[in-house]
Image (tube, rainbow, N blue to C red):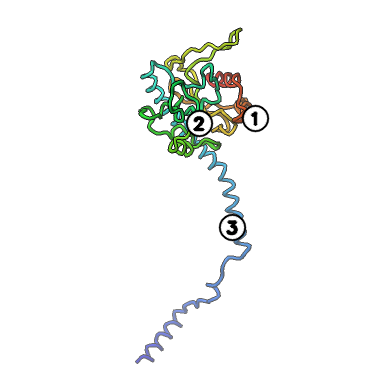
Amino acid sequence: MLSKLSEQLRHREVRLDLPKIKPTMLARGFTIVELLVTISIVALLVSIMMPGLRAARESAYRIQCSSNLRQIGLAMYGYALQSGERLPATLFDDDETLAPAELMALTTGTMSPIGDINPSMQWDGLGLLISEGSLFLDNPRVLYCPCHHGNHHFAEMTEVISKDSPTRIYCNYHFIGDTEQSIPSLTGEHTNSPRHLYAMSEMAIVVDGMRESSDINHRTGTNILRGDLSVRFWHDNKNLLNNTLISSSVDQPPSEQSYRELWADFSK
């Protein structure tokens, strides 16, 4: 019975003329040449796409930086409502301690007003927006630009605060200060006048860091927060910012006059 059934199946296979699968057809793979060509094509496509991806990432980071500055601006308005329309007070634009490069500082470090018992965490400038008990800026990370690639990272700030260290803390943004420094008179003295936020609608009040060359967050310019809470990107077409900071360092920051010229250009 089984022999008859197998015989019928053989005859049916012959009539259908089914193709025979050759084992050698299943064993074939990529050659080394084909693999190298594939890798070369992938590498070429990646090299073409990378500049576009970098530009897209920079654009996204710049938007996030603009959002940071708007939040800082809103916090400064909240501060001004409680301080007679004044900008956050800073020690680094006083006559005795005039240091424009230090207006990126959130704390004074070992410096402090007379009578301060614990100078290690003396909040200053933009740092007053995040100081203990402050309700102006609830997220300290806003003070750090996502494009920043130099010193002064958010992790450094949290480490210093946790240790209550006298190390001065810096953010990634530069504050104009709360007092207007006039040109020295014939006697060589400065005369200070307080800055009021409501009178600075067209003025630049916060920009990217300008303490040293590595503080530049955006290579082609800087985001600018103005007194009216608008944020605009200032394109450094004349290379003013880079030329000012290219040779600067922590020990040799730009001169007071250089800062004056940059802030004046930012406010145009």
Q: Quadrant of residue 248?
A: top right
Asked if marks 3 and 2 touch (Cβ < 8 Å), the reply is no
Task: State the residue in front, 148 or 252.
Answer: 252
Earlier in the chain: of badge 1 and badge 3, it is: 3
Residue at 42% x, 33% y: name it.
140
Q: Is residue 194 above or below residue 124?
A: above
Q: Quadrant of the C terminus?
A: top right
Residue 253 coordinates in the image, percent (x, y): 60, 26
| Quarter the N terminus occupies | bottom left
Q: Amino acid at mark 3?
A: Thr
Provide the residue designation for mark 2: 168
Q: Residues within 10 Å of mark 3 (few under 14, many from 20)?
A: few
Mark number displayed over residue 38 = 3
Q: CA distance from mark 1 to mark 2?
A: 23 Å
Q: Is residue 47 left or right of residue 87?
A: right
Say whether residue 60 is visible.
no
Q: Disc 1 versus disc 3: distance between alpha carbons?
A: 46 Å
Q: Position of residue 263 (x, y in %)?
A: 55, 20
Q: Residues within 10 Å of mark 1 (few under 14, many from 20)?
A: few
Q: Is there a contact, CB below 8 Å, between mark 1 and mark 2?
A: no
CA–CA distance between discs 3 and 2? 53 Å
Q: Which amino acid does the dot numbered 1 rest on?
A: Ser
Residue at disc 2, secondary structure: loop
The image shows residue 20 at horizontal and vertical percentages of: 50, 78
Q: Which mark is residue 247?
A: 1
Camera-side mark, 1 or 3: 1
**Element on which disc 3 rests:** helix
Relative horizontal placement of residue 48, taking residue 170 as reference (left or right): right
Residue type beneath disc 2: Arg
- Disc 1 on helix, strand or loop? loop
Classify 207 as above or below 2: above
The answer to which of marks 3 and 2 sits earlier in the sequence is 3
